[in-house]
Amino acid sequence: MNALETVNRYVLEAAKTLKLDEALTRFLMTPDRQLRVEIPIIRDNGKLEVFIGYRIQHNDARGPFKGGLRYHPDVTDSEVCALASLMTWKTAIVDIPFGGAKGGIQVDTKQLSLLELERLTRRFTDVINPIIGPNIDIPAPDVATNEQTMAWIMDQYSRSHGYTPAVVTGKPVSLGGSEGRGAATGLGVAFCTREACRTFGIELKGARVAIQGFGKVGSHTAISLRDMGAKIVAISDVSGGRVNQQGIDLKEALELQAANGSIQGLHGGDSVSNADLLTTDCDVLIPAALEDVLTEKNAHAVKAKLIVEGANAPSTFEADEIFEKRGIHVVPDVLANAGGVTVSYFEWVQNLQQFRWELSEVNERLERRMVQAFEAVKAKAALHQTTLRRGAFLLGLERVADATKLRGF
Ligand code: NAD
């Protein structure tokens, strides 16, 4: 099953348990609006090139559509659809007043200059302009997009609507971004790991953690967990990784990442492929790169006692079943990586109020929300004697279905 089939399967299962009407279930599974666009830009060599982009708005029953924008050569409508659906359940699980959306452009950012990326982003903003806005749909960073991308979108949108920082989140702090947004997803993953360790009787101090992906999510997860006393024993990026049971030198990894955009050249331990990292000897495994990396092919070989999904949809449905049978606990993506959208919500609130919060206030509120969401999911799972993932989908679907019914059709 691919990511879209997997998320739909969980939604269907939850809808059945909640005894939701069949037509309502179909409505909640289907995106409200799917936009596919052609994005022409003139390359630096003077030639025209056309890129394909998507913005898929899944559900806005609980508030404006909300979700990231991904730049990757493998972006498809099916992938964006799955990620948009996950956003709907995620925002409901952490109980913030947003719906779910996602966007993407089929592009390898490494092949474009900075000026070409800027032209691509501004042109994409123009073509999605009619369907975004602070009360309509609010994009944010995802794979291979960042604060600079959000600054361009904000600037381009503001040219036709006046100064509108609340149209995107994940902006630079100097342009109305929130303190703490950059680290928020990783910090949220770390809070969930801590709560899961408490719940399942794993000692976090000294726990050996392997993390796939050392981007915005993976790197901040690593720093936060190290600060909580865990030992990071493996990290990787797209070109491979490093495993070191004595502990990875995170300072060197961060310096390499800042200097070269990659952790290659890291000293100590042994090199490890992205595939082998997933089955490396560790207590906690954190996939924080792309989807569908844990499948029926490698799920039997995973050695971790706990998996915390930093990435969206890293486990296929079949892999999840194997983890359940093997007694490996999984903190699902819709809960584990919700720290990012939670602080995006704080950023949006600060923009609307034209008032700034201090980092300590952002992080305290983030911790409270994540712990509350973890407890709510845990309680739902216990009530139905099921996994945290099914508990999370039950909670999310119940809240979205409730809002949809109350608003009427
Ligand atoms: P990023 O672009 O900052 O980092 C991605 C990392 O994955 C990089 O280290 C990259 O080298 C690595 N990578 C890329 N392709 C890979 C491959 N084929 N195999 C192994 N590694 C690969 O992206 P990010 O924002 O850290 O997002 C990572 C995941 O977290 C995605 O699934 C994203 O949807 C999810 N997520 C991100 C946020 C956020 O706030 N950025 C929030 C929630 C969920």
Image (tube, grey):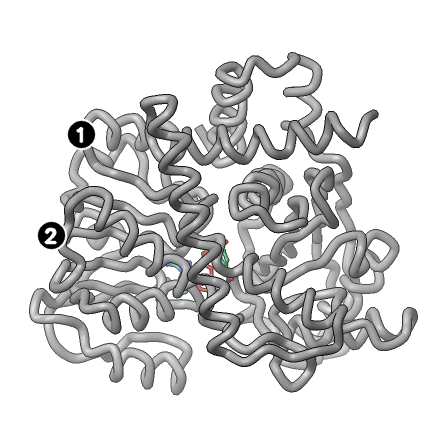
Where is ligand 1, by quadrant? bottom left
Q: Name the residue: 30% across, 40% down.
A: 330
Which quadrant would residue 166 be assigned to in this image?
bottom right
Q: Name the residue: 36% across, 39% down.
A: 315
Asked if disc 2 is less than 8 Å from ligand 1, the answer is: no
**Amino acid type, mark 2:** Asp
| Front-lying residue, 403 or 13 | 403
Q: Position of residue 380 (x, y in %)?
A: 41, 31
Q: Name the residue: 75% across, 29% down.
A: 406
Asked whether the viewer can see residue 290, the reply is no
Q: Is residue 202 left or right of residue 264?
A: left
Q: What residue is pinned by disc 1?
A: 326
Contact check, label 1 and label 2, Cβ < 8 Å: no
Q: Position of residue 136 (x, y in %)?
A: 80, 52
Query: Up-down: is 108 above or below 263?
Result: above
**Amino acid type, mark 1:** Arg
Secondary structure, mark 2, is loop
Q: Nearer the viewer, mark 1 or mark 2?
A: 1
| Front-lying residue, 49 or 28 | 28
Which quarter of the rendering shows the N terminus? top left
Q: Is residue 277 left or right of residue 177?
A: left
Looking at the image, is mark 1 or mark 2 earlier in the sequence? 2
